[in-house]
Amino acid sequence: MARGHWLDPLARGLLEAAGQLPRRAQASPEQRVEQDLLELKLQLDPQLRLSSSEDVRHAAALGWRLDVNRATASDWLRLPQIQARQVDLLLRLQQGGVQLSGPEDLQKLLEISEDLVRSWEPLLQFRWYGDGAPAAITPVKLDLNRASRSSLERQLPQLNAERRQRLLRERQRAPFQDLADLQQRLQLPAAVIEELIGKVRFGQGPAGPELPRSA
């Protein structure tokens, strides 16, 4: 278990005693047994994966937490039903400086159900590192592999003319796979990528040729 991202039981106890962490709610004897058993398993197996939303609730009651914007692969892989490709995307964006501001960001980025995100939520912490506030998220999604030049200009003010032109050239070579691929190939700042979460998608197949504008 990554000590920097999951709160171990000893640290939990110290923070509870100091009043810096709420004390755990009173559990039934059966829940207490299940929590103690899970705590022992987590201590014995650093790679243990939680198998259900009930496991997540028990782990949260024990004080374990996942710091979304600093989590490692092993941290993410503890969550029920998360896939390796989703963890890879999260880590690549983290390396690019991208931060998530809440459960909605995570749901839209991974394209998963609201119920699944809600089942993870007891363990998730969304700490913002550095200056600036999280960007607002809108439900509109623009297909960056197929959108016309005019659509890019109208719907993506985050990209200047040079970046839009580079996007058009790059997608002709190969469609963009995801936000991490877009960031790497266009060399975009993390702040730009954060603004695009939930606003864009990446359709399959190459885009059609861009016709020159009329004079």
Image (cartoon, grey):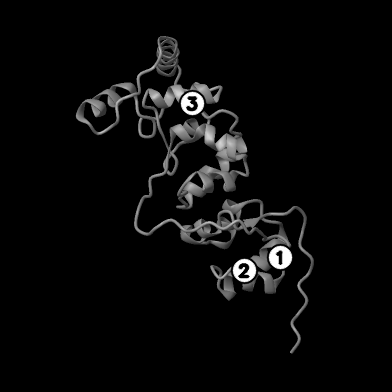
Q: Residues within 10 Å of mark 2 (few under 14, many from 20)?
A: some
Query: Could you tell me which residue is drawn at 47 percent across and 52 percent down?
Result: 98
Q: CA distance from mark 1 to mark 3?
A: 40 Å
Q: Amino acid at mark 2?
A: Gln
Q: Position of residue 178 (x, y in %)?
A: 63, 51
Query: Could you tell me which residue is drawn at 59 percent across and 75 percent down?
Result: 161
Residue 99: mark: none
Nearer the observer: mark 2 or 1; the answer is 2
- Relative horizontal placement of residue 193, taking residue 145 as reference (left or right): left
Nearer the observer: mark 1 or 3; the answer is 3
Q: CA distance from mark 3 to mark 2?
A: 39 Å
Q: Is residue 129 above or below residue 30?
A: below
- Nearest to the observer: residue 73 or residue 193: 193
Q: Tell me if residue 6 can be seen.
A: yes
Q: Are marks 2 and 1 in contact (CB under 8 Å)?
A: yes
Mark 3 or mark 2, earlier in chain: 3
Q: Which residue is mark 2?
A: 155
Q: Position of residue 132 (x, y in %)?
A: 37, 59
Q: Which residue is mark 1?
A: 147
Q: Amino acid at mark 3?
A: Val
Q: Position of residue 37 (x, y in %)?
A: 43, 12
Mark 2 or mark 1, earlier in chain: 1
Q: Which residue is mark 3?
A: 56
- Relative horizontal placement of residue 39, taking residue 214 as reference (left or right): left
Q: Are marks 1 and 3 in contact (CB under 8 Å)?
A: no
Query: Could you tell me which residue is drawn at 75 percent across and 52 percent down?
Result: 204
- Nearest to the observer: residue 209 or residue 133: 133
Query: Could you tell me which residue is drawn at 53 percent across and 26 percent down?
Result: 53
Q: Residues within 10 Å of mark 3 (few under 14, many from 20)?
A: many
Mark 1 or mark 3, earlier in chain: 3
Q: Amino acid at mark 1?
A: Ala
Q: CA distance from mark 2 to mark 1?
A: 10 Å
